Image: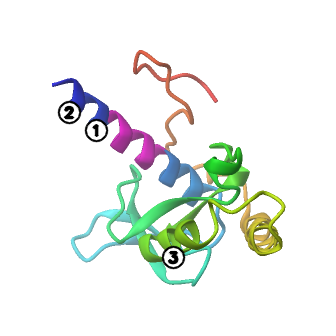
């Protein structure tokens, strides 16, 4: 039972972060899916592949959370450090780079490139999107960001 609760909490956290990433990424726009529901569509931070999320942040494609500065290197869940990436792109970066030493020039170059891309895509969240609080309290109740 506890494992199921943790999995649900992790899924909600991922959806919340995906939604915030899409809301603050100018490549993501409101659209209508084939089944008539409102969705957000935008691009992978790495390869520009198209991704679709429901308006509650559930991915309808292989969208994942990319930590620009890897968590293994002290990266956080701050919105400026997060982007949406294809599962394949995210896994590839993690497999090739995330465990390298901080001073590794290739790691630093990729981080700088992704930070520039994310900064260029940043926007205030649109007024029409009902965003949940960015963080959740340990007891599962939502906190304000």
**Residue under pointer 3:** 89
Mark 3 falls on what kind of element? helix
Between 96 and 53, the one lying in front of the other is 96
Q: Is residue 70 above or below residue 74?
A: below
Q: Which residue range is magenta in the image?
A: 9-16
Residue beneath label 1, please?
Answer: 7
Picture residue at 57% right of the left edge, 36% below the top:
134
Say which label, 1 or 3, has the lower sequence index. Answer: 1
- In this view, which residue lies farthest toward the top? 139
Q: Does the CB distance between marks 2 and 1 fall below 8 Å?
A: yes
Q: Is residue 1 magenta?
A: no
User: In the rendered view of the protein, which quadrant contains the N terminus?
Assistant: top left
The residue lying toward the viewer, choosing from 4 and 53, is 4
Residue 145 occupies quadrant: top right
Q: Are marks 3 and 2 in contact (CB under 8 Å)?
A: no
Q: Residue at x 51, y 76 (%)?
A: 89
Colour theme: rainbow
Q: Residue furthest front?
A: 101
């Amino acid at each position: 039972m506890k494992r199921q609760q943790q999995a649900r909490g992790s899924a909600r956290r991922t959806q919340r972060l995906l939604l915030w990433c899409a809301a603050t990424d100018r490549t993501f726009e409101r659209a209508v899916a084939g089944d008539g529901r409102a969705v957000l569509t935008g691009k992978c931070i790495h390869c520009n592949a198209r991704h679709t999320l429901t308006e509650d942040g559930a991915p309808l494609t292989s969208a994942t959370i990319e930590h620009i500065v890897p968590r293994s290197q002290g990266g956080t869940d701050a919105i400026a450090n997060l982007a949406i990436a294809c599962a394949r792109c995210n896994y590839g970066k993690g497999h090739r780079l995330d465990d390298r030493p901080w001073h590794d020039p290739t790691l630093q170059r990729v981080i700088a490139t992704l930070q520039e891309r994310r900064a260029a895509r940043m926007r205030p969240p649109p007024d029409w999107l009902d965003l949940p609080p960015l963080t959740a309290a340990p007891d599962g109740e939502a906190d304000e960001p």
